Amino acid sequence: MSDAQVKILGERQAFAPLLTVEGIKVHYGAIQALRGVSLSVGKGEVVALIGANGAGKTSTLRAVSGMLKASAGRIHFGGQETTSLKAHQLVPRGMAHAPEGRGIFPNLTVLENLELGAYLRRDTADIRADMEKNFTLFPVLKERRNQMAGTLSGGEQQMLAIARALLSRPQLLLLDEPSLGLAPQVTETIFRTLRDVNKAGVSVLLVEQNAHLALNSAHYGYVLETGEVVMAGPGKALLESAEVRRAYLGE
Amino acid sequence: MAQLLQHLINGLAAGTIYALVALGYTMVYGVLKLINFAHGDVMMVGVYMGYATAFAIGREARGSFLGIAAVFAVAMLGCALFGFLIERFAYRPLREKPRLTALITAIGISFALSYGFQLDIGFLPGASPRAFPEIIEPKEWIIIGDRDVVVWNWQVISFLIAVGLMVGLQYLVFGTRFGRAMRAVSWDHRVAALMGIPTDRVIALTFMLSSGLAAGAGLLYAIKDTSVSPLMGLYVGLKAFVAAVIGGIGHVPGAVVGALVLGLVEEFVVGYAASTWRDAVAFGFLILVLLVKPGGLFGRVAAEKV
């Protein structure tokens, strides 16, 4: 249950700390989803969480963003303890979470969805500029801005979810399965955009089924198994590890 | 022909009042998926607040424009506060519990209010209905032919107030930042929180809004009926709930259309058949609509999200 059992492969590149999670536990009723997960994300770092279905990847993201309450453990974000804060209190501190299943509002237009991303911002001119920037990243959203978001294709909805999360000007972007159900080409577009976003200084904590894709784009990665971190290391090192290749890359 | 026109006018006047109450059911259902069975009784409490205000300011003042405004303002604001308190202390603690728990709580509040107000202790009014003061003195404004069609001033005023409140609400829901937040919470309040929306506050404001509108509607109903009683909430509330379901609960314009249709149906039954059939036909009409369109006229039947 402790970090002592985590197998660490290779040296981590140094980043200033942004998010630190220490030993969080999460229960759904009697079922324990997380049994003490510790991880960290640095400023400007891309961190991937990989693992099988039910390993606790989504629960970890939800606990970090305040959607779920951790029953034990501590979370620090941006130099402050945020363990007991609720989701809407973390947004103004620089956290954005594009949840599993995209979580767009299908009953609102694309533009309204984007405007909700900037819900807490009052800098109208800057919002407009950011909106335009988003439209250059994802031109299809501009075309469809007055359409109901529920009418978008899966890939477009994913783009919308990411664009919406970016409109809050986050320091940290939490992404849950951005490639789920998407054609390889669309996935490629989304990951290319993620790299651009990261280059602009946004940290990313990424949950992915597609371990190959995730580890290739991440500086650092964690492997989750039944609610615990069992392995950690730089993305490349994990990709080369025999265990990871056997368990998650189907070799 | 003239008779038809008269019934049309009466039906619309009644329908707009139902509409204001129905909007409360539909808004609360929209954000919480809760059928707030206490809504009609909250309305009744608002009417008594207006009743007390009308007496407090005296016979002279209550006929003036300012007097009417004061009665409406006290009732609507007081009722909004009352709705806030109910949400805060009765429903919010049950937010994460199964939906049935909140529903039963709502029914409990409904009965506590409608029967509690029949007590004759302290400020409680007692069981017997009371005459509602004529804050709008009835006048015949439009007379067509030899009294073939008569439109009363309170019908016009009540229609205008109701339409004004509905237009305002439509703008609030579809034209403002708060309305956007409301619609986001209505889809999924956990994802809405990820946008930085304070969902508890949005839900509380929705309750205040729906309770305030209900108080306004209740006053219009009391003016039309010239009486107020502790059980009026059960009756009007049930009818408005039927209207909301006919329109498709959770659908804002649907509630208005459902209420107008219900008001017209009732009026035509009373006019062309017998007034004793009114409620039977109203509920029969509901059953008919649900048989053909299970989600209501505008609602869509969606598979339960898992």
Image: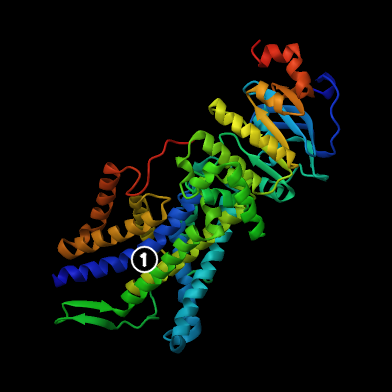
In the drawing, does residue A140 fall left or right of residue A32? left
Where residue A198 appears, as percent x and y from the top left, is 72, 38
In the image, what residue type sits under mark 1? Answer: Ile
| Number of numbered markers | 1
User: Coloring scheme of the render?
Assistant: rainbow
Where residue A195 appears, as percent x and y from the top left, is 69, 35
Q: Which one is nearer the viewer's eye here, A154 or B214?
A: A154
Q: Which one is nearer the viewer's eye here, B173 or A126?
A: A126
Q: Which one is nearer the viewer's eye here, B57 or A16?
A: A16
Q: Quadrant of residue B214?
A: bottom left
B178 lies above or below A89: below
Residue A139 visible, this orientation: yes
In the drawing, does residue A202 fall left or right of residue B268? right
Where residue A126 appears, as percent x and y from the top left, is 66, 56
In the rendered view of the protein, which quadrant contains the C terminus of chain A?
Answer: top right
In the rendered view of the protein, which quadrant contains the N terminus of chain A?
Answer: top right
Q: Residues within 10 Å of mark 1 (few under 14, many from 20)?
A: many
Q: Residue at x 20, y 60 (%)?
A: B269
In the drawing, does residue A157 fall left or right of residue A88? left
Q: Secondary structure at mark 1?
A: helix
Q: Residue at x 42, y 66 (%)?
A: B167
Where residue A246 appears, as percent x and y from the top left, is 69, 11
B152 lies above or below A246: below
**Mark 1 = which residue?**
B17
